[in-house]
Amino acid sequence: MELKYLSEQQVNELLDMKTCIGLMKDVFAAFAEGKMENKLRSLFPVGAGKVFGIMPAIIPTEDVCGAKLITAFHTNHAKGLPSHLGIVAVFSNDDGQLLGICDGTS
């Protein structure tokens, strides 16, 4: 299986705000109907004003599971970087293969 990767630019080109709002509406409805499972995020302090977070979810109807891995370093603004940087990794519920990774910053 070929691993798919979407850069920040590709994510921004594919997902405009209207599309994202519609997708989030669908996700919240699926969650309310018990069609997906989302555990509370885990946050780990890295230092003063710095956190590493993991946000897992399982979507059985789509046959995938995955997680957003993110850092929140509030000192990054002084370096000209976003405070929140991350990726989203998606795996197959069938055989556990990594299906794709996309930028999670935008």
Image (cartoon, helix red, strand yellow):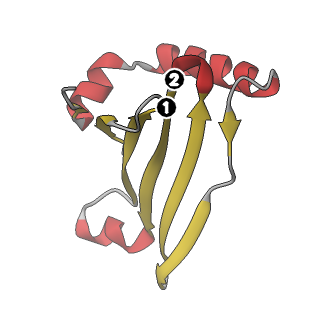
Query: Local crowd at mark 1 within 10 Å, few (<14), some, or many (≥20)?
Result: some
Q: Residue at x 58, y 14 (%)?
A: 22
Question: Which one is in front, 20 or 93?
Answer: 93
Using the image, determine if residue 88 lies above or below residue 33.
below
Question: Which one is in front, 19 or 33?
Answer: 33
| Whole-percent x, y for residue 72 in the image | 45, 64
Numbered-mark total? 2
Q: Residue furthest front?
A: 95
Residue marked by disc 1? 93
Q: Quadrant of residue 25?
A: top right
**Label 1 sits on what residue type?**
Asn
Q: Is disc 2 placed on a helix, strand or loop?
A: loop
Q: Which residue is drawn at 44% across and 69% down?
A: 74
Question: Which one is in front, 87 or 38?
Answer: 38
| Whole-percent x, y for residue 60 in the image | 60, 25
Q: Residue at x 34, y 65 (%)?
A: 77
Q: Say if mark 2 contacts mark 1, CB within 8 Å.
A: yes
Tag of residue 17: none
Q: Which residue lies furthest to the left in this view?
A: 2
| Whole-percent x, y for residue 26 in the image | 65, 16
Q: N-terminal of the two: label 2 or label 1? A: 2
| Whole-percent x, y for residue 44 in the image | 54, 74
Quadrant where the C terminus sits is top left
Q: Which residue lies furthest to the bottom in this view?
A: 48
Q: Which residue is drawn at 27% across and 60% down?
A: 81
Using the image, determine if residue 105 lies above or below residue 20.
below
Residue marked by disc 2? 63
Alpha carbon separation for disc pair 2 and 1: 5 Å
